[in-house]
Image (cartoon, grey):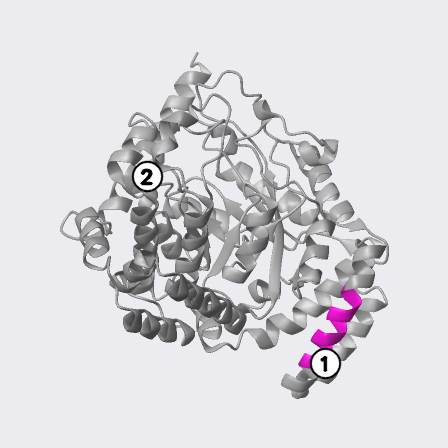
Amino acid sequence: MKTYADKEHRWINKRIKKDQIKKYLVDGKNFIDEQEIYSTLEKNKEPRPEYIRRLLQKSLRIENLTLEEAAALIAVEDPQLLDEMKKTAFEVKKKVYDNRIVTFAPLYLGNYCVNNCLYCGFKAENTEAQRKVLNPEEIRKEVEALAGKIGHKRLIVVYGEHPHNDVDYIKESIQAIYDVKIKTRKGYGNIRRVNVNAPPFSIEDLKEISSVGIGTYQVFQETYHRETYNKVHPVNTIKGNYDWRLYSMHRAFEAGIDDVGIGVLFGLYDWRFDLLALVKHSLELEARFGIGPHTVSFPRLEPALNANMKEYEKYRVSDEDFKKIILVLRLAIPHVGMIITAREPADIRGESIDLGVTQMDASSKIGVGSYQKEEKEQVQEKQQFILGDTRSLDELICEFVDKGHITSFCTAGYRCGRTGKCIMDLLRKGEEGKFCKLNAIITFREWLDDFASEKTRKKAESIIKKEIAEVKEKYPKVFELFQDYYERTKQGERDLYI
């Protein structure tokens, strides 16, 4: 009789499809040329102010910057030029995304893992970690808390790499999330977009996962520096295969998933190298498939159970360097959605909006099963890392309103086919706003009536009026339809979108 360990071993051995790495290589090499990145940083370390200003104009035209141009922005130290970069980044974000902020919540469905990433609380050999995989009933309860009490409309679901979280489980769990509908104050709550943060899969498996209607598929390279990657991801694990992970998005596009998210875990290696490599990844996808990433994430390394943080002190990213990372990404890949998570403290998250961030999570809990239990304290044995911002969605939205931002719960574009190349083209032309602005107001009205505290709702009325006035002025041809949907939403209808 085979033991579970035998089954696990066979499962691991079947995961990596070598032919689905080799097909993308050029002359046997991947697209991350470390020497190119180092030399590009070196050659552009003293950019002239007039050159930087030309690059800012290019960003304002919503054009990608080259690797050399991004390296020049990284090198800027002059306070006046940095101030100009910040102002331009805000204008770029406003041009592409207006004053909308998208919110979501992370939902960890399991924390078993066959990998042994040295910095992660979920690593396989961490015997102190409390392991769990949610069953359908537990998933339902988590979603009822998220969609029925807090008011989230979109999630990022997180899976460990383990037989417990195989393709069948992922499909079943996503369908279970979509199936939940729960009564609220005036209407009902449900999750309308499930983004997936999962391990790399084969093209065949990705086609299966795509069939249940996922949103963005995220895989972060963690670090693009191969020596560091090999050091923190043991070679006898699946994640120890650098190229298998690197080409995750290539396989996703081939599988028909045209909405992808990439990212780096900053703090494992020199942030300048990894930032330029992240830009290179985006440029590679667009050159190969005509579609870049829809979102980019830039989490910083945080303390985790039995992770020796002293090992990473050399590459710790300061707050000022972290803000420059955000700034350069907004200017180098101007169309992209930028996600800052609750890993970061509240003050940094607040500043990040003016630097170009477009998405944030709130009311976040990253212990498996933590939402239904309404756990208030963070439990290290249950979590992958420690959160820096534990504010509620209502508190975050109230802050957004104070700063003149509207919160969007819209998921219409993904259900209307405005994804992939279509969304990229609309974003670059500044035309996605004619859909997003209208739908943001409608969904914000929905959330305010169903979930907001009295304080937040009262504050938000003024920004709603302002947004409606702008719609009437900018989009008169659709204003009548918009007004009809808005009034019907006030009366209790839900999930209306243009």
**Residue 421 found in image quarter:** bottom left
Front residue of 413 and 176: 413
Q: Identity of the amino acid at label 1? A: Ala
Residue at mark 2? 269
Mark 2 vs mark 1: which is more N-terminal? 2
Evaluate whether residue 197 shows in this view: yes
As drawn, the label of residue 469 is 1
Picture layout, residue 266 above or below residue 306: below
- Residue 241 screen position, x and y as percent: 29, 35
**Residue 116 found in image quarter:** top left
Front residue of 370 and 143: 370
Judge from the rendering whether residue 152 lies leftward or rightward of residue 157; answer left or right.
right
Picture layout, residue 397 above or below residue 197: below
Q: Find the magenta span and give its range.
A: 460-470
Judge from the rendering whether residue 318 lies leftward or rightward of residue 131; answer left or right.
left
- Residue 243 screen position, x and y as percent: 28, 42
